[in-house]
Amino acid sequence: MLSNLELGLYVFMLATFVGLEVIRKVSPLLHTPLMSLTNAISAISVVGAILITSQQGATMLSKTLGFIAITAAVTNIVSGFLITDRMLKMFKRREEKK
């Protein structure tokens, strides 16, 4: 029988390989919507990490890993929004100088 850790690692590895294959097949035209989707997934990760680290009786290891997860996900969210904003600015018309 698989332990919770083994099952979690198995799901993580499977999700990593599936995610890499899905992203590899995305055309560059769909990059901005894909960034928005990954921001939403990162937001779910932040909520999950906050819930896990805030549980009463959480070990120091789970709090440390939760902090790392929150930091990484928030960095991903902010970076994604900054990159998406920069890409969308490329499509705006520039005002002519007089």
Image: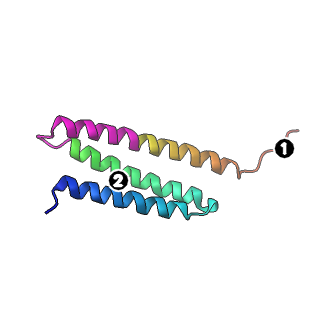
Residue with the mark numbered 2: 44
Seen from the viewer's position, the closer of residues 26 and 76 is: 26
Indicate whether 15 appears above or below 76. below
Report the Cα–Cα distance between label 1 and label 2: 43 Å
Mark before the other along the chain sequence, 1 or 2 = 2
User: Residue at point 40% right, 55% down?
Assistant: 41
Q: Say above or below: 78 vs 26.
A: above
* Residue 29 lies in quadrant: bottom right
Identify the mark at residue 96; answer none if there is no mark. 1
Q: Quadrant of residue 66?
A: top left
In-image side of 7 versus 12 (left or right):
left
As shown in the figure, which amino acid type bears the numbered disc 2?
A: Ile
Main secondary structure found in the magenta portion: helix
The amino acid marked with disc number 1 is Glu
Q: Nearer the viewer, mark 1 or mark 2?
A: 2
Up-down relation of residue 53 to residue 31 (above or below): above
> From the viewer's perspective, is residue 24 above or below residue 92?
below
Crowdedness near tag 2: few (<14), some (14–19) or many (≥20) residues, C-alpha within 10 Å: few
Q: At numbered mark 2, what does the secondary structure look like: helix, strand or loop?
A: helix
The magenta-colored residue range is: 54-73
Write the residue at 37% across / 38% down: 71
Residue at 22% of width from left, 46% of height from top?
52
What percent of the width, then of the height, locates residue 2? 16, 60
